Image (cartoon, rainbow, N blue to C red):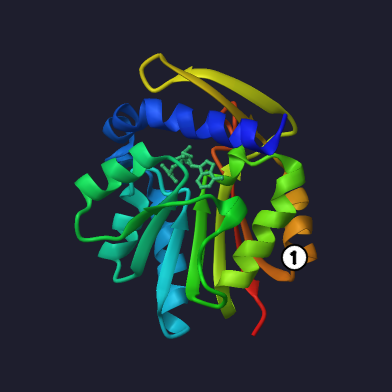
Amino acid sequence: MSDQGWLADTRTSYDTVAVSYAGQLRDALAGEPYLRAILALFADIVHAAGGGPVADVGCGPGHVAAHLGKLGVNAFGIDLSPAMVDVARRDHPGLRFGVGSMTDLDLADASVAGLLAWWSLIHVPDDEVPTVFGHFWRVLRPGGLLLLGFHVGDESRLKTQGYGGLPMKVHVHLRQPARVSAWLRDAGFTVEAQMLLDLDESVAGAVLFARRQP
Ligand SMILES: C[S@@+](CC[C@H](N)C(=O)[O-])C[C@H]1O[C@@H](n2cnc3c(N)ncnc32)[C@H](O)[C@@H]1O
């Protein structure tokens, strides 16, 4: 699959589901105490390091960036899907959102204190992950914190519909935390914490905290 192919398919898919996705996920964090605790920990560590801008890359409809905003984080969002960005701007007019891809991240070097990719790296094929982590390392300040959330597993699935039966054509890449950690170390990060979630569900989740060394 060409780079343009998967990016275009992913963009079109999330453009199609953006409004429905936002409707289903808008209040999801209210029922997710572990995820809220992880985001609060992320916010605490960013604050303790002096604060600064935090990029939510693959932000979708912006509810996670908005949650971080309520925790006092100077969060802004970037997403591949223009329709998702439209919804995010509509729902969270006080925050900044822009269209962009994590494979070609249009942020200045060392410009953010923190960066999260919250179940968005799941759509990036393996051979693009080192490029993405290179961008994450480049845009984070020395000492900056990276937070990744993703599905755990060993296979890639093609999702053909979702969020109310709407048509999608998007690959979802499940990964083992050890594999993602190895990519992070290769990119120059130190992995500081790993958490596993939903262990009895059919698809578990993992969260990694990693740091660009000062
Ligand atoms: C499963 S949704 C997660 C959205 C949000 N982070 C959340 O937790 O609800 C995946 C999001 O990643 C975005 N995405 C996929 N590939 C991307 C890329 N290469 N660059 C930026 N965003 C991307 C999609 O448009 C979509 O909004």
Say left or right for 91 vs 50.
left
Q: Is residue 36 visible?
A: yes
User: Which is more toward the observer, 106 or 68?
Assistant: 106
Give the x, y percent position of residue 207: 58, 52
> How many tags in the picture?
1
**Residue for point 31% across, 27% down:** 20
**Residue for point 48% across, 73% down:** 112
Quarter of the image for residue 82 reads top left
Give the x, y percent position of residue 186: 80, 64
Say left or right for 42 vs 130.
left
CA neighbours of label 1 inside 10 A, class few (<14), some (14 to 19), many (20+) = many
Give the x, y percent position of residue 143: 59, 81
Q: Which residue is identified by label 1?
A: 187
Residue 29 against residue 105 in the figure, above or below: above
**Residue for point 30% across, 60% down:** 96
Pick the quarter of the image with the C terminus.
bottom right
- Disc 1 is placed on an element classified as loop
Pick the quarter of the image with the N terminus.
top right
Going by the numbered disc 1, the residue's amino acid type is Ala
Quarter of the image for residue 61 reads top left
Give the x, y percent position of residue 159: 56, 21
Q: Is residue 205 visible?
A: no
Ligand 1 within 8 Å of the CB at mark 1:
no
Residue 95 against residue 86 in the figure, above or below: below
Say left or right for 206 vs 12.
right
**Residue for point 48% across, 75% down:** 113
